[in-house]
Image (tube, rainbow, N blue to C red):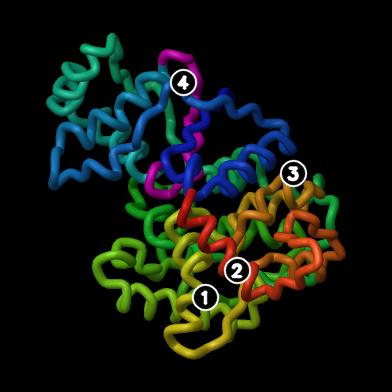
Amino acid sequence: MKYAYYPGCSLVSSAKEYNIASKAMFEALGIDTPDIEDWNCCGATAGHAINHTLSLALPARNLAIAEESDVDTIIAPCSECFHNLATVNKQLRENDHERRLVNSVLADADLEFKGKTEVKHALDVVANDVGYERLSENRKIDLSKLRIAPYYGCLVVRPPDVANFDRVENPQTMDNIAKALGAEVVDYADYKTACCGGALILPKEDVALKLIKNLLLGAKRAGANCIIVPCPMCHMNLDAKQQLVEETFGISIDIPILYFPQLVGLGLGLDPATLGLDKNITSPRRILDLLGIEFTGEIEVPGVSISLEEEGRIKRLVFELR
């Protein structure tokens, strides 16, 4: 199977660690992931309510470019990008009128959407193309001391006629990936697909922070020492906003949030820096210590002792400047 990799805007900016970890994971699994040449925004910023034709043409351009390179499947690690690319791919295949409309736009760039390429989330590729058995066979590090809360978010499993590789209400792919790598999975079913407040973090921050608090406390009460996610927006809210939640509600949470390729990479024996773990805001040092993995990518200032809280503040500032 031939793949083309669609990073999308987040993975080359605010979610660089997801991009780094995904590339490292696929390389370790023997999967070549060349980027779609001259890719553009998936259409998330256009929105059907703002400009319907543009919201179709933007992802269709990426699909058409991938088709020209004669690949079977596009890998989209970002849940929003996956949602937009897969939805438009299905829509244009089934709607002759919209396909003709979009192709009239793409013709100006000498492109044509033909509907020959599948779109898969990176989670789908690992779970179903790679498979749990292969993950287990390639495991290098014992992850049995990790108690994982898998958080899927809203988009990676919805709508079911597009994201049809997992259950909608109680998805299992990240659970099974963690188990294949030897980690324990906690009962997190009540929160697995609950909203993280991604669309509310700017207009209604107080509401978003309550949603984030519920998810984080739900994981902690379930006994998790780590949360894994497949989405840049979910990661930003649970990781970058975790300290703000603690300050706002006067609570202590302190749970590392890993992208699922970071967990897979650790299980495959990859170096933490190779997985971008030095860029995570809530320090992953505590779980790396449990695994006996030395972490040299942390912030160091000669002659100065930096606490985990201070390290988090510094990383939050760096994150906001990316």
Spatial separation of the CA atoms under disc 2 and disc 3: 35 Å
Image x and y of residue 83, in percent: 36, 45
The residue under label 1 is 243
- Mark 3: which secondary structure? helix
Residues drawn in magenta: 68-81
Q: CA distance from mark 1 to mark 4?
A: 38 Å
- Circles 1 and 3 in contact, beta carbons < 8 Å: no
Frontmost residue, 232 versus 146? 232
Q: Amino acid at mark 1?
A: Gln
CA distance for labels 4 and 3: 30 Å
What residue does disc 3 label?
A: 134
Q: Earlier in the sequence, mark 1 or mark 4?
A: 4
Residue 312 is labelled as 2
C-alpha gap between disc 1 and disc 3: 37 Å
Looking at this view, name the residue that lies furthest to the bottom: 250
For the residue marked with disc 2, what is the amino acid?
Gly
Where does residue 266 sit, x and y in percent of width and height?
A: 75, 54
Q: Is residue 103 magenta?
A: no
C-alpha distance separating marks 2 and 4: 35 Å
Task: Single out the mark in the foreground, 4 or 3.
Answer: 4
Quadrant showing the N terminus:
top right
Q: Are marks 2 and 4 in contact (CB under 8 Å)?
A: no
| Disc on the earlier residue, 1 or 3 | 3
Mark 1 vs 4: CB contact within 8 A? no
Residue type at mark 4 is Glu
Q: Dividing the picture into quarters, in which one does residue 285 lie?
A: bottom right
Residue picked out by circle 4: 37
Sequence-first tag of 4 and 3: 4
Q: In what element is the residue under mark 2?
A: helix
